[in-house]
Amino acid sequence: MAFPTDTFYGLAVDPRNGDAVERLYELKGRGAAAAMPLVASSVDQALEIGHFGEVELRLVRSFWPGPLTLVVPAHPGLAPRVLAGGRTIAIRVPADAVARALAGALGHPVTSTSANLSGQPAAATPEELPATLASGVDLLLDAGPAAGGRPSTIVEVAGGGPRLVRPGAIAWERVLESLE
């Protein structure tokens, strides 16, 4: 399913279903070493699939719902391919009500990789979906244009503190300031 988020359109499958995850990797042409990010309907739903320490919870309180993705240790139950051989999962609660409602209606977080072919620009509207991608999507949830702009900022908290994985919509300086 293609659906809007507070940044771009994303592609959703059940991250617990190995066949669905495999199909998503093939559809996007995504490399096996790249994990799939998830969106959740709420903080509680995110806590069901990942372990959040005190620093991550401080970031959650400051930036969720919104375009901050946190990399946290994953709980069991996700398809191994979603984790790309690792033990962590990237997850966020988006500011977009449609994206949150989708995860809420399904009762669990969903993948939220950008609706594009790997390495290509992300789609901010349904019309921007590449034809080869659109033909492989079972359902398009068209809620008009997504905000576009920058993707979500991705942060991982390791032993030495927070680490910027990918710059994005939330400035790194704001992330650091929220932890002071």
Image (cartoon, rainbow, N blue to C red):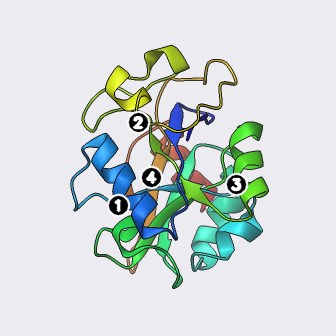
Which of 119 and 136 lies nearest the eye of the viewer?
136
First in sequence: mark 2 vs mark 3: 3
Residue at 35 percent across and 59 percent down: it is 22
Residue 26 location (% of width, % of height): 28, 49
First in sequence: mark 4 vs mark 3: 3
CA gap between label 1 and label 2 equals 20 Å
Q: Amino acid at mark 4?
A: Ile
Extreme residue toward the bottom, this view: 76
Q: Nearer the viewer, mark 1 or mark 2?
A: 2
Residue 35: mark: 1
Residue 95 visible in the picture: no
Residue 12 lies left or right of residue 113; in this view the side is: right
Residue 78: mark: none
Which residue has dot 4 on it?
A: 154
Give SS at disc 1: loop
Give SS at disc 4: strand
Residue 173 location (% of width, % of height): 49, 45
Q: Amino acid at mark 3?
A: Ala
Which residue has dot 3 on it?
A: 103
Residue at 26 percent across and 48 percent down: it is 30
Residue 130 location (% of width, % of height): 36, 22
